[in-house]
Image (cartoon, coloured by chain):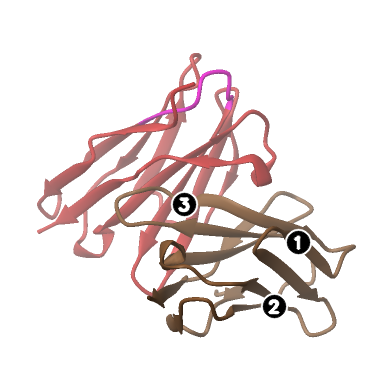
Chain colours: A red, B brown
Amino acid sequence: KAGVTQTPRYLIKTRGQQVTLSCSPISGHRSVSWYQQTPGQGLQFLFEYFSETQRNKGNFPGRFSGRQFSNSRSEMNVSTLELGDSALYLCASSATPIYNEQFFGPGTRLTVL
Amino acid sequence: DQQVKQNSPSLSVQEGRISILNCDYTNSMFDYFLWYKKYPAEGPTFLISISSIKDKNEDGRFTVFLNKSAKHLSLHIVPSQPGDSAVYFCAARSNNNDMRFGAGTRLTVKP
């Protein structure tokens, strides 16, 4: 069974631009969560989608948004990029909204110049 | 707000010895705790978990201890192996599925 895939793996953008990251969960998994990882901050929860509905949202500004498609694939969008948005963005999937069963993808490394 | 804290950013131990990674939390609503291991260029992988109704869970070389009164948990790795070198994240989940992670501890096991 293929794991969680994220595209692209690396991305370089400039301030003010917007970016869209993609996550394909493990086949059959309907829950997708997004996390931001920065040095010293650990993994910070962005949001979680289950069956195309956002179930939970972390404490991030409205520039961060996401969506989930009927095939459970998810996208995350960040508009008006800031230097502080440079981070590793991780996606995790699970069959149901049960976090102890989460499987993480390799992440997308975003650098904002 | 750092509801889950890993106060040691790094830890270095000798192969064969015990590694002890610590984690503190502030939210008494957390009822499930997890440890993840992360290698460079890979996503975190689930290692071991413990429910708040237990104080110990063991899986091979890995044991997690939970002290609810102190809001503290620890991960023990015995014996430590060079392949255990990675970043370890502590995570806590509340009953409304709110999930929080610590900042991670980088473990280095020296041969």
B94 sits to left or right of B16: right
Which quadrant, please, contains the N terminus of chain B? bottom right
Q: Earlier in the sequence, mark 2 or mark 1?
A: 2
Q: Is residue B39 magenta?
A: no
A108 left or right of A102?
left
Q: Hey, what amino acid is under mark 1? A: Glu
Q: Residue at x 46, y 64 (%)?
A: B84
Answer above or below: position of A42 versus B7.
Answer: above
Crowding at label 2, few (<14), some or many (≥20) Cα neighbours within 10 Å?
Answer: some
Q: Main secondary structure of the magenta part?
A: loop
The outermost residue toward the right is B53
Q: On residue B44, which mark appears? A: 3
Q: Amino acid at mark 2?
A: Thr
Q: Which residue is mark 1?
A: B58
Depth check: A72 or B58 in front?
Answer: B58
For the question of whether residue B32 can be seen, the reply is: no
Q: Pointer 2: what residue?
A: B26
Residue B61 at x, y percent in the picture: 64, 63
Q: Quadrant of the C terminus of chain B?
A: bottom left
Note whether residue A10 is visible: yes
User: Upstream in the sequence, badge 2 or badge 3?
Assistant: 2
In the image, the segment drawn in magenta is A23-30
| In-image side of B16 versus B50 (left or right) | left
Magenta stretch holds residue A29:
yes
